[in-house]
Structures are given as C-alpha cells and as structure tokens.
Image (cartoon, helix red, strand yellow):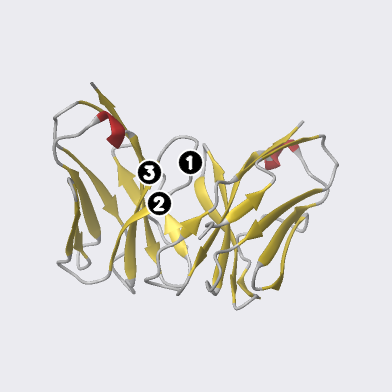
C-alpha cells in the first residue's frame, strides 16, 4: 500500500487569493498521479492525470506540476473563487489508486 | 451517459442486518472499484475488478464483506452481518483503463448501522 500524503489538511483563503497544495508520494515504481476535486454532497471528479516527470497541466485557473524523482506534486489555484471551495484529493498507483486524505479548501467572498 | 449509478443513496439499518450496495459502472469501462470513505481513514480501496474478475481484494476488512460482479454492468458489495463500525460512505468507481485512466465515481451510498 502506497503512502500518499497531502498538506495542508485544510485551508481558508479570501476570494482572489492564489493558493497551492502539496501531494507527496513514493518516487519508486511511480506510474501515475491523479488530482480530483470533491465538492460537498457530490462525488469526486478528476482534474488531472499526470505520468511524466516535469509534467504541467492546466485547466482554467487550476494547474498542477509533477516531480516524480522527488515524489511530489503541487496543485495551484490562481485567483480563488467561492466555487473553488471543495476538497482536493491526490492519488497515486498503477492498477489501483491510493488516495491521500485531501486538502479542504474554503474560499470566502 | 448516465455515469456510475449507485443504490441506495442512503441506508440506515440495525446491527446484525445484511446490507447490499449496488453499482452500475459506465458502459464500456472494464475496471470497477469499491472504496469506503471515513473521516479517520479517508478513501480506502476495498476491492478492484477488471473485466468482471476480482483482482485485488486485500482492502476488504474481514469476512463479513463480500463483493461480486456477475457481469460488466453490475456489481454488489454485501456486508453480513453489519456492525456500527461499518458506518461510512461507500463509493463505486469505474475506469476505461487501469493505471493512467481517470476514475469516474458514483454519488456514493451512505450507510448508517445503529
């Protein structure tokens, strides 16, 4: 079982602030790193799937980077909006994914 | 596409009763996963099927838990007998390919065992 860690556990920012979270994972036998967005009372939805060292992906104001050699990924949100409030999960693995416990983001207007 | 469909959405039962949770994956997806979400442990993988065959059930907590996938469009997770510590949200997810394929989650079944 992989050890996937996320920090911080929770984050409270003001609308317009930019923020970032960290996901760390074992660098040995790396295959893929996933980021999911999980809104309250809904199901997790995939944001990014990253496989290559140095990969950088972007979707609107959200972007992610990947460092497989040192075993970490960053998720960035530029100009946070209240609708960005959610729990952000990362996961790593091959045939099965091990999830971190997530970073809970609250964006206040 | 209707997405991954789970039922029931909510179940409240008494300790000792049998609980059956159901999942219909997205058509064409060949991998199906059952996860359990708790505050303490986050999302934990219970079991993974590929092409209807159980591949990894190492996350199934104990013999009270069992899962089946009789065909490509249906899976069940059964708890018998249920205990209060089984209270959690159970998610089913499917994917088109293992590894780099993103997971598509159902809306979850919230189980409360009294």
Residue annotated with mark 2: A45
Mark 3 vs mark 1: in front: 1
Relative to B50, A28 lies left or right:
left
- Measuring 48% from the left and 41% from the top, which residue is drawn there? A42
Q: Is residue A11 visible?
A: no
Q: Secondary structure at mark 1?
A: loop
Relative to B78, A14 lies left or right:
left
Pinpoint the chain carrying mark 1. Answer: A
Relative to B55, A103 lies left or right:
left
Mark 2 vs mark 3: in front: 2
Pinpoint the chain carrying mark 3. Answer: A
Q: Are marks 2 and 1 in contact (CB under 8 Å)?
A: yes
Image location of residue B79, percent across then percent down? 77, 51
Pinpoint the chain carrying mark 2. Answer: A
Residue annotated with mark 1: A42
Picture quarter with the C terminus of chain B: top right
* Marks 3 and 1 on same chain: yes
Quadrant in the picture for residue B85: top right
Nearer-N-terminus badge (3/1): 1
Image location of residue B89, percent across then percent down? 60, 42
Q: Is residue A51 visible?
A: yes
- Measuring 32% from the left and 46% from the top, which residue is drawn there? A6
Nearer-N-terminus badge (2/3): 2
- Mark 2 and mark 1: Cα distance apart in space: 9 Å
Image location of residue A11, percent across then percent down? 28, 31
* Marks 2 and 1 on same chain: yes
Residue annotated with mark 3: A102
Q: Which mark is residue B83?
A: none
- Mark 3 and mark 1: Cα distance apart in space: 15 Å
Q: Is residue B62 above or below residue B31?
A: above
């Amino acid at each position: 079982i992989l050890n996937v860690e996320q920090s911080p556990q929770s984050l409270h920012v003001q609308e317009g602030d930019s923020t970032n979270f960290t996901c760390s994972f074992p660098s040995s036998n790396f295959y893929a790193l996933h980021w999911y967005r999980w809104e309250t009372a809904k199901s997790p939805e995939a944001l990014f799937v990253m496989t290559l060292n140095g990969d950088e992906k972007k979707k609107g104001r959200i972007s992610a980077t990947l460092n497989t050699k040192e075993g970490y990924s960053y998720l960035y949100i530029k100009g946070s909006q209240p609708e960005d409030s959610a729990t952000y999960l990362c996961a790593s693995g091959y045939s099965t994914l091990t999830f971190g416990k997530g970073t809970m983001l609250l964006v206040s207007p | 596409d209707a997405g991954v469909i789970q039922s029931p959405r909510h179940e409240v039962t008494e300790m000792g009763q049998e609980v059956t949770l159901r999942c219909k994956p997205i058509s064409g997806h060949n991998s199906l996963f059952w996860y359990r979400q708790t505050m303490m442990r986050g999302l934990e993988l219970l079991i993974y099927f590929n092409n209807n065959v159980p591949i990894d059930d190492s996350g199934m907590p104990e013999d009270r838990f069992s899962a089946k996938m009789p065909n490509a469009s249906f899976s069940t997770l059964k708890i018998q007998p249920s205990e209060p510590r089984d209270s959690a949200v159970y998610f089913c997810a499917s994917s088109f390919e293992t590894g780099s394929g993103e997971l598509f989650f159902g809306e979850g079944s919230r189980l409360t065992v009294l």
